[in-house]
Amino acid sequence: MESSEPGIFRSWSTPHIGSVPLVSPTMLSNISYYVGLFEFAQGSSPRIVWDNDAKLIQNRDLFLLYIVNTPTDFPSETYIPKPTIIKSVYNDLFYIAIYMQINDVEARGFTRPLVLVVAHPIKKLITHLYETKMETLENYADKLQKSAAETFPHDIQKYTVSIRNTIEKHPESKELLQSKVNELESMMKLMKITPEKDIEPYDADPEYFLHIKNDLRPIKKLTHFNEIKSDLLKFISNLPNDVIQSRSLTQLRKETYTMIESVYLRDSPTLINIFKNKTIMDCLFTLYSGHTLFILANDTNEAQAIASRIAVLTPFGQPFPVVGSTERSDIAQIVICMSFDPEKYQNYSLMDLDNQAEFTGIKCPQDSILMKELPKNTDHSSTSLVSLFSIELKKIGMRFLCKMMELSRRASQPEERVAQQMRSIGFSSADEPILKNWTAIAQQIISSIP
């Protein structure tokens, strides 16, 4: 029914499902990202420094050869040039490549080219990475460059002192080594350094400085790669593996703040206390289980402001409906009332704002996923709390929906197997009321996908 009270939102006569954008069921959720670090020189085959050996690349050698033959341009104003980033595709494999140069006094031109590559067969996932996570990925390249550059100033000074010492001992080599000397002087000018007087040269023949050394120091050692390897793998493992996650993570904050801006934004001490004493968990457990939350208050304006903020804490889409009256309590909705008849309803929860937000009804169990995963720090404004909770709740809902789509593509699963799958994404047996309600929602969403 429609409420006649001003400012009260419309009621829904069907269970709250929300408005979830539909996507193709093609998710490839079992395919991981390919990530690798390669060293290459112009015209030679790339050397694999390290990769995660993902199975999605059928011919890795051809892929890497394509990567390293992409033209790049590094600025010459600094001896640690900013990396070049390219987003492209090779044979239906989408990738991001970060081309960088690291310093090595033993290498030609005193630099060694590396490329850090992340690839996946789903374009939207690579686009999501490019648009939202590039700063983190670039930081890994930056760490590799800086690690290699730590000893380079000393190494280049020692090299310069040594070649000058060789020319003094072998004057006939001056003409042969002059181009190398010029190269060294240009590099030190770029670095704004001069050889320190106390640096001891190493004794070497002229041929040493003319010989192209192919047996260079290992990249892993030079860049301290093993120090960032675990963090890099963790970063890759946390990237979305399907288009639902990609879209949700990309728009998560935008949608959250859009919903929050649509309600009253003045701070609410009462709502802060509801978060602090965890009454909010009871409210959410009630709604997520498919039941009605009644808010009893003489001040309906304050009640509406609080209800509107709680209403946006939905995992799947539009806010829960906020109404002025109802004939049913088996609907996920929030009802604002100035009086309440407990004999009229069953399986509901009641929060009395006139009595310090006292809560009676469906309590949230201590081992519920809500208790385990929602923010513990409540020292924020009420608006910030709503924002923080909304983001985490949407992540939980997203994990659940992805798991349900995965299960829907399999043969019928035993109940214990399904329960095990739910535990793998954070739910417990205490969340059975939530899972029952959310499963019905997920089934409607999945059945609507063409």
Image (cartoon, rainbow, N blue to C red):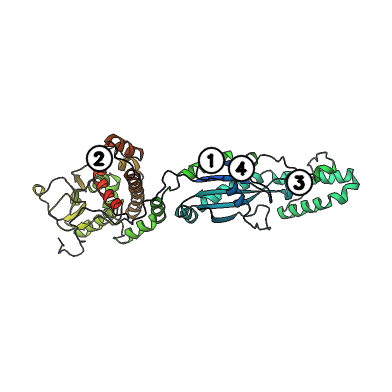
**Residue that mark 1 sits on:** 53
Mark-to-mark CA distance, 4 and 3: 30 Å
- Residue type at mark 1? Asp
Q: In this rendering, which labeled residue sits more in front, label 3 or label 1?
A: 1
Residue 48: which disc?
4
What residue is drawn where x is 81% and y is 46%? 210
Instruction: Say which of 229 and 5 sits in front.
Output: 229
- Whether residue 28 is visible here, answered yes or no, is yes
Instruction: Say which of 331 and 71 sits in front.
Output: 71
- Residue type at mark 2? Glu
**Residue that mark 2 sits on:** 432
Mark-to-mark CA distance, 3 and 1: 39 Å
Q: In this rendering, which labeled residue sits more in front, label 4 or label 3?
A: 4
**Residue that mark 3 sits on:** 157
Q: Which comes sooner in the sequence, label 4 or label 1?
A: 4
x and y, in percent, of residue 109 in the image:
73, 50
Label 3 CA crowd tier, 10 Å (few <14, some 14–19, many 20+): many
